[in-house]
Amino acid sequence: MGVMERKRESGVSFAPRRDPLKKTSAEIVKEARQSLRTLRTQRPFTPREPQRQLFGGGGGGGGGGGGGDSVHANCDGRPPSTFSIYAQSFDSTDSRPGSGTRLSPLNHKPKPPDPQVVAELVKAHPRPPAGPPDSKRGPAGPRARPPRTRTVPSLQALEGATEAKDRLSAVRSQQSAQGEGGGPDAPPSADYTAISGGPKSGLGRPASQRNLMCAPLTLSCLCAYSRTARSGADSAGGPPIRSAPGARTERGGREGAAGRDEEAAEASFWESAIVPLLAELGATDTGRDEGSVERLCDVCVSLHGVLTERQLLGRCCHRRAEVLRTLFRLIDLDSALLNLHIAKLCLALCVSGKNLLNICKLIFKISRSESNDELFQNNSIIDSLLVVLGSEDVCASGEAVLYCVGTLKFLSGNGALLRLLLAKGCVGVVHQLLQRLHPLSEPGHAYFTTAGHILVQLTATLRNLADHPESRQLSLSHDLLSELSLTLRHHQDNLDVCTNTARVFSKLSSYSECCLALAQTPDCYQIFIELLRKHHQKQDLAVRLLFTLGNLTAKSDEARQRLFRVDGCTGALLQVYRAYQRRDAGPPSPTGAGPPPGRARESEDVLVKLVRVLANMCIHPDVGPALAADPACVELLMETLERRSVAESEELLVNVGATVNNLSFYWEQDSALRNNQLAIAKLILRLLLSSSMDAMLEGTRVYGNLSQSRDVRDFIMQNKVDQFVVTLLDSKSCEVCYAACGVLTNLALDTPKRAKLSREGAAAKLSDCLRDFGPGDWQLAGQACRTLWNLTEPGDSGSAGLHVALSEQEREALLEILELYSCEEEALCMTDHRRACWESEFLPVAQKLIQRLQPASCPVNPVTSDLFV
């Protein structure tokens, strides 16, 4: 940005009273608005966590225990950061996925049936005649299978006996017609076998008893029993269950043969390729030396490759449990490198339930040590973690997801791993997980606490990712800012989530594109104000929210208005202002010299960011007058000027001076700032006389506006501020010279003060300033011409002000400079922007001043600094 562009942002514009130098009211207001300035400040420092903890200092600690679940969460219910994982912690029977659903127990307690009712049912169903002996059962004898004991059916089961009997009779009739039931006189046991498709039950029991036990069962119950019996026999490794005669078709036979061939091929492959690898992994003489660990790692890699090539990963491997048992035994070797290979292979085999949780804990435990970060760079375990985050159900595996995200939080603190996470699409996975957590974050949801724990890790991960430039565009493309705003709304009472999210906002809002996207996010202003009202005592949260609001209001006039229109915005901001202003007035430090240094720095950091928000907000024409008329706002600003010193609180006082300067443009009759203008002028004197160039410049700007008042001009002359301002014209800074010209322009309105300024050499210094800065800063050149116009104005008695202000030699030199800078030929060489500034800011005043400096010039009224007509 060029010097002239900066001037339009930061300088004070002054307009003449009447033609030809007079500007319209709209032009004056426009210039005044352009000179209002936004403030910049440093982004709050994000401290690096001294130790890698799941929830920082307050979350989960604890020592080691005997197993993976031996260490319980801390008192607030959060999972621990420290625990021990052993082979015995795993469930070696993880061969089928858990249902994920647990049924609540029934409150019904069955009562034994009345013996009299049972007797009546037995009479109603007499025993059929005994059938011929079943040759398949074998001879009875001492080795015969003892009869099964059965429980007495409950009354509810017996109630459907009649209906079940009718259904069974219909089935028997149909089977008899097809020739499968053995005739109408076939024993009931044959009918039961045909219906159920399972093994014959009730061996060694009389047929009448078997009939009694089967009668209450419906057909659906029998089929369910058949399926249960078949699956039980298969899982137990028993012989296959024979189906009814004629049930297998020709096609089924071919499929069965193909299936047996495929099983045989898989068994052969297993014995030749996988069993040797498992044997090597399960060798009992495996040592703990480095060479043995590396060999085991190579075997794990080979096993993973073989299973991948054969497409036996996931849950499609029939002997998956055997692989998992072998891998789980190796965890006791306590090798980080080997455990990462084991974890990667276990995740590829889709472990679930307790085993998934323990694997995620194992990876988390390894990631807690920074020395292990290199292991994650050379291993694709990050891909496996992202798959878990993208696929696992939070309700069923919430704690596993928690430790998985906690691992990513630790890894994202490493620069190399951070880039790797971004390259693997971590931002997209995090975005999807945020969306899945929103329904769980509704108040009263059963998994609300689990969602909060996960969000602590998730927002901390995003906080680390936000440091990388590539994450900004990714955040915009995934609309992360809107998702995080919704997260803040749901978890306003979770300080960890709020603080981490505020850190993400403070980082991303420092960049224009992200700041614009956040400014357009619905309800973000309302959420920020609510958090400030609720957690204003939480310093690290308040300072980041205020920094983000300062960024939003610095770049958008719409954002200033939207923030101001939030219900209770001004009250909330002033509440925070008052709380941190008075915090330093609390108990003194042990040395007795005011508040402790740490607390004072924290309070000042919040005040710096808050005052910046006020300064940026009041640029809007609807907000500025309201703040200038607010006595509480003006009182707090004056209190800060009175309590603080430039040496200790330079940035804060500079921001307060800029805020007062912006508010001073709204010079309404009901303005609280106008009613306290003399008191403010006295306080601003401390800035002007300080050793800080920034504070001195800000104080000069404030005097440039306050000196519209005669009382303030008298105060300036009485305290010899005018001499200091004249000295500022010797500065090599365009900004300082421009601000000094604004004060001198107003002081030269009064004839006595004009003469004093002339005796101090103000006119000669203005000529030098015009000569040095004119071609590079036409705004400064035009302001210097306005000040010279007022200094050369004839006095009230008609005395020639020109001869008082300038000697003949100085007048000729100034005239030569003005004629040179007013040449049209020189203007043709300028850029369009500079030419426009030259024509509007410098040329009109310079031409009239040339007329006055010539011998036969006629008097023209002086220029005033009144901003509003």
Image: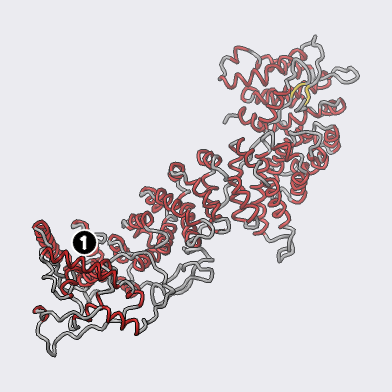
Q: Secondary structure at mark 1?
A: helix
Nearer the observer, 178 or 106: 178
Q: Is residue 296 left or right of residue 790?
A: left
Q: Amino acid at mark 1?
A: Ser
Q: Which residue carries the number 1 mark?
A: 302
- In the picture, measured across the screen, residue 281 lies left or right of residue 620, that is left
Residue 144's place in the image compared with 398, above or below, is below
The way the protein has been coloured in the rendering is secondary structure
In the figure, 706 relative to 404: above or below?
Answer: above
Q: Quadrant of residue 265?
A: bottom left
- Is the residue 312 above or below the residue 473 in the image? below
> Is 334 or 634 nearer to us in this picture?
634
Q: Nearer the viewer, residue 851 or 625?
A: 625
- Across and down, in percent, residue 84 comes to 40, 72
Q: Quick check: can you spot residue 701?
A: yes
Q: Residue at x 36, y 49 (%)?
A: 424
Q: Is residue 627 left or right of residue 353?
A: right
Q: Position of residue 77 (x, y in %)?
A: 51, 68
Left or right of residue 563, residue 270 in this image: left
User: In which image quadrant can residue 798 be found?
Assistant: top right
The quarter holding residue 226 reads bottom left
| Residue 182 coordinates in the image, percent (x, y) | 11, 70
Are there few (<14), some (14-19), or many (20+) residues within 10 Å of tag 1? Answer: some
Quarter in which the C terminus is drawn: top right
Image point (53%, 68%), residue name: 76
Residue closest to the far right: 797
| Quadrant location, the N terminus | top right
